[in-house]
Image (cartoon, grey):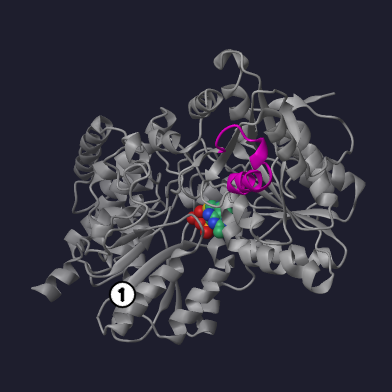
């Protein structure tokens, strides 16, 4: 309702959303919205396919958290490297993974990013500088730290970024990564996706001291931002990357958000208080960005454009074959080592520096 | 006797021991009010309280390590890994702290670690593993793997009562698919093998979910009436060597079946035992069936190609019978 009034309203003063970052053009802002819409649309499509029995295994999504992976990845350069986790589909969209390959991935098709070897969100396109997650959380914090270590060793102006959840902060690897990165002043950005729950476990059972406080104790800045505002996440990560590239070391960015769906599709999340969900529903990241752009953008047209792309990708993915069982034992060992490639980096700030 | 699913039998075993012994308590991620990822501890908080059905932080090393600590001061902790795969994150505490404690210091560590294991439902490389061999290789750990509801309860109670660290593998694919009569009340099943079906012509040695595959694949009508014996190992450490060798002596032909990756698997240990001590009794090569050495893939055609199934076992038995 508030949104509809905003669009129709005269000067919409009460409803307008302030810009958070001076580093974003209007085209950037539209791109952020397009990316979030794409993530949500792909995940909704995949969830439908799951319910139709076309997606095997279990199904995880990042509904309501689209701003985090969108904003954070948007701030990363082509030559930077990213570890994307299970709520971060937009990271793949920003980096340029084709939508039909993502949908084929969910369905276990031969044309999926992992060719059916791994499932759902367990993927990363190596050619686009993304390392797919393993389930063991938060193992990727150390992998990201290691990528940053190599960049520093070689004197390269590049950074690595990893996502991780609130529950993951309880594992020893969280400590090991933060400590190591701080001791060696590595160009790595740790994006904590605080979505209030780890499966059924609330924050109160996970920690007594806020992670951003702990970041300071390790010797790095800890900043907390509105995880439902893609521009706020972007700005925090952009600043963290700038620091990292300048030799300032790691940053922990906490994006405060909410897991609006169950842990996975089977989970009715009865343990989440209804009022909490209702509060967060008012703060939908996509609606926020739409309000920000409402005066200057035909939001309906953009939505239709995104939906058309998803429909086309679905058709392609559905035509793709299942993997050949004869290939089941292929690929355990490499014949040669090829490092990760560069990804897409659509932020206009990079275009300026490259031009 | 009530009929329970494999999963209900595990719950029943936990409940029975918790009622009988107040030293027994549970630790795991989301096992409290939520009742666990697979609902094994559904309703437990209401009966036993949050202290004895403890929701832990996401921290497997801490779950196993604090269990060791609690055990050496007199408690009987039972740890749940949300999936067996995540025991890799608690490996050190289990293998180096728990497993070696008694040998080094004469100090017993009576903990049970429950591992929901196995594939067959597109869980992919991190939710399908059968990690038993890792722990067989580590001295000081007992390793059990029930295949029936009756044994699921009895082996669990046996594990909790055992004064040693016991790794308890519960196969996810059996949770709701397998039902059977389960004795009421308290009973501990010994850590030895059982004859799942007696026969004279050939022996299939298996454990966990593969016992059901073995039984199905060797139904007499599928094998021209051959009488195939199926041995359910139930315990991998200790390994019931006498039962294995007795069956080899009786049938002279053996197929060893594992769902786990083939190299250094439980089945490899069984095959080595037979080669060393049953050679004279053999009338054919020891045949092994196991998953090839690849991560368990997600996509159904790939997963089915990797996991041992009824057809593969039947063909192997047919060939060996004709040998
Ligand atoms: C080491 C480890 N233990 C257990 C699990 C099972 N598991 C999967 S997701 C999850 C909750 C993760 O919570 P959080 O880190 O907050 O991320 P979220 O899913 O909320 O995004 C758990 C316990 C796991 N993936 N890794």
* Residue A48 point in image, percent of width and height: 39, 32
Placement of the N terminus of chain B among the 4 image quadrants: top right
Q: Which residue appears at 33% of the width and 64% of the height? A: A82
Q: Based on the picture, tell me whether residue B308 belongs to the magenta stretch.
A: no
> Crowdedness of circle 1 by 10 Å Cα count: few (<14), some, many (20+)?
many
> Label 1 lies in what chain?
A
Confirm whether residue A229 shows in the render: no
Q: Residue furthest left?
A: A355
Confirm whether residue A340 shows in the render: yes
In the picture shown, does residue A328 fall above or below A202? above
Q: Which residues are magenta?
A: B266-286
In the picture shown, does residue A29 fall above or below B233? below
Q: Where is residue A88, by image quadrant?
A: bottom left
Q: Which residue appears at 71% of the width and 29% of the height? A: B250
Q: Which residue appears at 60% of the width and 56% of the height? A: B134
Q: Quickly name the residue at label 1.
A: A159
User: Which quadrant of the picture is home to ligand 1?
Assistant: bottom right
* Residue B151 point in image, percent of width and height: 77, 36
């Amino acid at each position: 309702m508030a949104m509809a009034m905003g669009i129709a309203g005269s000067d919409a003063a009460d409803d307008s959303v302030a810009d958070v970052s001076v580093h974003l053009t209007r085209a950037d802002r539209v791109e952020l919205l397009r990316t979030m819409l794409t993530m949500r649309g792909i995940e909704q499509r995949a969830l439908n396919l799951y319910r139709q029995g076309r997606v095997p295994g279990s199904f995880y999504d990042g509904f309501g958290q689209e701003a985090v992976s969108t904003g954070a990845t948007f701030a990363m350069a082509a030559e930077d490297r990213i570890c994307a986790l299970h709520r971060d589909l937009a990271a793949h969209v920003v980096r340029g993974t084709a939508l039909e390959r993502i949908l084929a991935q969910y369905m276990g098709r031969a044309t999926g990013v992992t060719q059916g070897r791994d499932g759902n969100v367990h993927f990363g396109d190596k050619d686009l500088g993304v390392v797919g997650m393993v389930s063991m959380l938060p193992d990727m914090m150390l992998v990201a730290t290691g990528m940053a270590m190599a960049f520093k060793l070689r004197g390269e102006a590049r950074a690595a970024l990893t996502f991780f959840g609130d529950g993951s902060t309880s594992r020893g690897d969280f400590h090991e990564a933060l400590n190591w990165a701080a001791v060696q002043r590595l160009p790595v950005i740790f994006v904590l996706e605080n979505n209030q729950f780890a499966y059924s476990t609330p924050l109160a059972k996970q920690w007594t001291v806020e992670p951003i406080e702990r970041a300071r104790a390790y010797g790095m800045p800890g900043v907390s931002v509105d995880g439902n505002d893609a521009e706020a996440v972007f700005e925090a990560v952009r600043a963290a990357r700038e620091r990292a590239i300048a030799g300032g070391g790691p940053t922990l960015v906490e994006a405060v958000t909410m897991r609006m769906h169950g842990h996975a599709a089977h989970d009715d999340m009865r343990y989440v208080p209804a009022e909490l969900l209702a509060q967060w529903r008012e703060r939908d990241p996509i609606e926020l960005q739409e309000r920000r752009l409402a005066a200057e953008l035909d939001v309906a047209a953009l939505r239709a454009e995104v939906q058309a792309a998803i429909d086309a990708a679905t058709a392609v993915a559905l035509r793709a074959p299942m993997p050949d069982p004869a290939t089941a034992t292929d690929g355990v060992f490499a014949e040669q080592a090829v490092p990760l490639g560069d990804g897409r980096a659509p932020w206009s700030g990079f275009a300026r520096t490259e031009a | 006797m009530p009929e329970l699913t494999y999963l209900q039998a595990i719950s029943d075993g936990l409940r029975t021991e918790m009622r009988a012994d107040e030293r027994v308590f549970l630790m795991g991620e989301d096992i409290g009010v939520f009742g666990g990822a697979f609902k094994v501890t559904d309703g437990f908080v209401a009966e036993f309280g949050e202290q004895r059905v403890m929701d832990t932080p996401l921290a497997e090393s801490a779950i196993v390590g604090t269990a060791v600590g609690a055990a050496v001061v007199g408690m009987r902790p039972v740890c749940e890994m949300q999936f067996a795969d995540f025991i890799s994150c608690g490996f050190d505490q289990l293998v180096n702290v728990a497993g070696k404690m008694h040998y080094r210091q004469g100090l017993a560590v009576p903990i049970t670690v429950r591992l929901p294991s196995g594939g067959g439902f597109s869980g992919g490389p991190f939710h399908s593993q059968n990690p038993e061999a890792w722990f067989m290789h580590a001295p000081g750990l007992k390793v059990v793997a029930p295949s029936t509801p009756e044994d699921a309860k009895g082996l669990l109670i046996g594990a909790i009562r055992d004064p040693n660290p016991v790794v308890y593998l519960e196969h996810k694919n059996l949770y709701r698919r397998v039902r059977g009569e389960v004795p009421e009340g308290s009973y501990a099943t010994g850590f030895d093998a059982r004859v799942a079906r007696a026969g004279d012509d050939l022996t299939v040695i298996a454990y966990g979910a593969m016992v059901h595959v073995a039984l199905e694949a060797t139904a007499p009508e599928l094998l021209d009436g051959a009488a195939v014996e199926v041995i359910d190992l139930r315990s991998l450490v200790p390994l019931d060597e006498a039962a294995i060798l007795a069956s080899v002596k009786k049938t002279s032909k053996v197929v060893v079946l594992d769902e786990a990756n083939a190299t250094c698997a439980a089945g490899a240990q069984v095959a080595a035992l037979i080669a060393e001590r049953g050679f004279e009794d053999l009338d054919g090569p020891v045949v092994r069936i196991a998953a090839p050495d690849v991560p368990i893939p997600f996509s159904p055609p790939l997963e089915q190609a990797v996991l041992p199934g009824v057809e593969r076992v039947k063909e192997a038995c047919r060939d060996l019978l004709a040998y």
